[in-house]
Amino acid sequence: MITVFGGSRCGPDAEEYKEALLLGRLLVEAGFHVCSGGYAGVMEAISKGAHDADGHVVGMTMNQFKSSPNAYVRKIVPSRDFYERLQALIRQSVGYVALRGGMGTVTEVSLVWNQLVTGVLPRRPLILLGACWPRAMACLQEQLVISHDDMTHLSFVDTAAQAVEALRAQVVLSADA
């Protein structure tokens, strides 16, 4: 299963929504199951793209949220709160792709990245999709204590097709991929 992170505040006209829609379809065509937070924005787009390709779509939701999951999620996995939800998103996956988002996306990427750097998670792909990521990470590396080795846990790509190509190169598919 591949977990996709991204903002909830974008609509169908946003570039990251369009890219997530394509990414969902391409992930399914490559043999992957898709997982996200299950709500709006990028989460909806990834779910729709995967659903329309007849893929397995999981939404990790929160009981405390007033919003309903998007209509394209086939399996809903509720959690008590944001932290439990985030842990479920991380544990269930063999790889991660992040598109442009807000503080929730930054939190998700940071936690996965930290767990990869510290060895809590075995090495697996963390792919940052879109033009925003190289600049954001360069700024973090300039301002914080982030080593070259820490950066080796990140892959930067410009397109959904490149993200799927990177995942295919790094992930061995199994029945529950």
Image (cartoon, grey):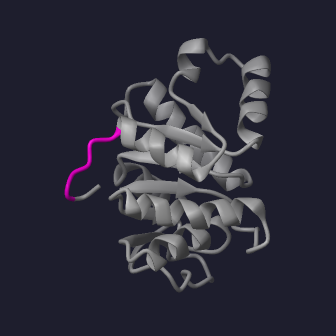
Q: In this view of the protein, which residue sits in the foreground, 175 or 88?
A: 175
Residue 79 in sight here: no
Q: In this view, does 37 lie to the left or right of 41?
A: left
Q: In this view, does 15 lie to the left or right of 171?
A: right
Q: In this view of the protein, which residue sits in the foreground, 29 or 72?
A: 29
Q: In which quarter of the image is residue 79?
A: bottom left
Specify the quadrant that holds the N terminus: bottom left
Q: In this view of the protein, which residue sits in the foreground, 26 or 174?
A: 26
Q: Residue at x 56, y 81 (%)?
A: 70
The x, y position of residue 129, in whole percent, is 63, 45
Q: Exactly how many numbered labels are in the figure?
A: 0
Which residue is outermost to the top? 148
Magenta stretch mostly in which secondary structure?
Answer: loop
Would you place residue 20 above or below residue 78 in this image? above
The x, y position of residue 131, in whole percent, is 75, 42
164 in the magenta segment: no
Would you place residue 75 above or below residue 154 in this image? below
Q: Which residue is drawn at 40% across and 57% down?
A: 88
The x, y position of residue 100, in whole percent, is 71, 52
The x, y position of residue 116, in whole percent, is 44, 31
* Stretch in magenta: 171-175
Specify the quadrant that holds the C terminus: bottom left
Q: In this view of the protein, which residue sits in the foreground, 12 or 63?
A: 12
Q: Residue at x 47, y 79 (%)?
A: 52
Residue 53 in sight here: yes
Would you place residue 129 above or below residue 86 in this image? above
Q: In which quarter of the image is residue 40?
A: bottom right
Q: Which residue is drawn at 44% across and 24% down?
A: 118
